[in-house]
Amino acid sequence: AQSVTQLGSHVSVSEGALVLLRCNYSSSVPPYLFWYVQYPNQGLQLLLKYTSAATLVKGINGFEAEFKKSETSFHLTKPSAHMSDAAEYFCAVSVGGAQKLVFGQGTRLTINP
Amino acid sequence: GAGVSQTPSNKVTEKGKYVELRCDPISGHTALYWYRQSLGQGPEFLIYFQGTGAADDSGLPNDRFFAVRPEGSVSTLKIQRTERGDSAVYLCASSLSSTGANTGELFFGEGSRLTVL
């Protein structure tokens, strides 16, 4: 069965610094991979998704993620953090186009002024 | 409305009581999903509907949990004989369809927080 591991339940960076949120997946077949973000008091919203096209995926708000099959990773990055990026981020996987997303435990991102 | 609407936003009940949670999806979205999120955890899949039928209910934890979508729009998650372990945020999401380019592109509501005393 597929699964997702997010390394680090809390990440703290300074405003303007690089953001790196780690996600590793486990799947025996090519997966679809997603990053969702949850801002305080809001529902989850899709940041970006990988569906076997380009391995570098660009999303909203300057975020991007790179699919690395050899490392079974799909890490999320942003070159320069902004205070508005403070939120909880979830990596998710689905297999074979299935709608049953399996989510990681989430990483809470804090931005220091 | 513009987004997925869930009611109530908060529900406190006593152990053993019956609870209903309602989800109103985005207009025109044919697929609807229920997830459960416990404190400090990611969302956990419960069930999804394509139209009126439950396409996958493999995540429902036991037969105390049941969900319906009789007209292919609004859905109700029903929990019988609630237990303290049912306390969580119940999330509803919808999507344009369950296949193709929209795979995995879910629009979530803000959730219904259930507390069982």
Image (cartoon, rainbow, N blue to C red):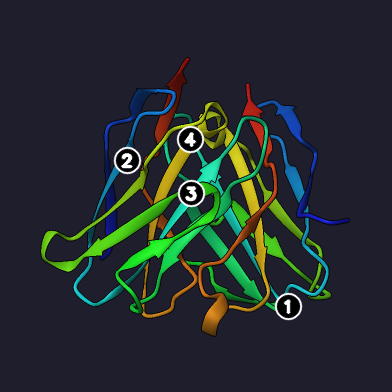
Task: Judge by depth and name the residue closer to the eye, B60 or B36.
Answer: B36
A2 relative to B55 in the view: left or right? left
Q: Disc 1 sits on a residue from what chain?
A: B
Q: State which mark lies toward you, 3 or 4.
A: 3
Q: Helix, strand, or loop for circle 4? A: strand
Q: State which mark lies toward you, 4 or 1.
A: 4
**Sequence-wise first label, 3 or 4:** 3
> Which residue sits at x=60%, y=56%?
B34
Q: State which mark lies toward you, 3 or 2.
A: 3
Q: Please name the amino acid that badge 4 sits on.
A: Glu
Residues at circles 4 and 1 in contact by the CB criterion of under 8 Å: no
Percent x, y for residue A5?
A: 26, 47
Q: Disc 2 sits on a residue from what chain?
A: A
Percent x, y for residue B91?
A: 62, 48
Residue assigned mark 4:
A88
How would you rate the neighbour count of disc 1 (Cα within 10 Å): few for under 14, some for 14-19, many for 20 or more?
some
- The lab-note entry on whether marks 3 and 4 share a chain reads yes
Residue assigned mark 1:
B52
Residue assigned mark 2:
A21
Tell me the tag on residue A62.
3
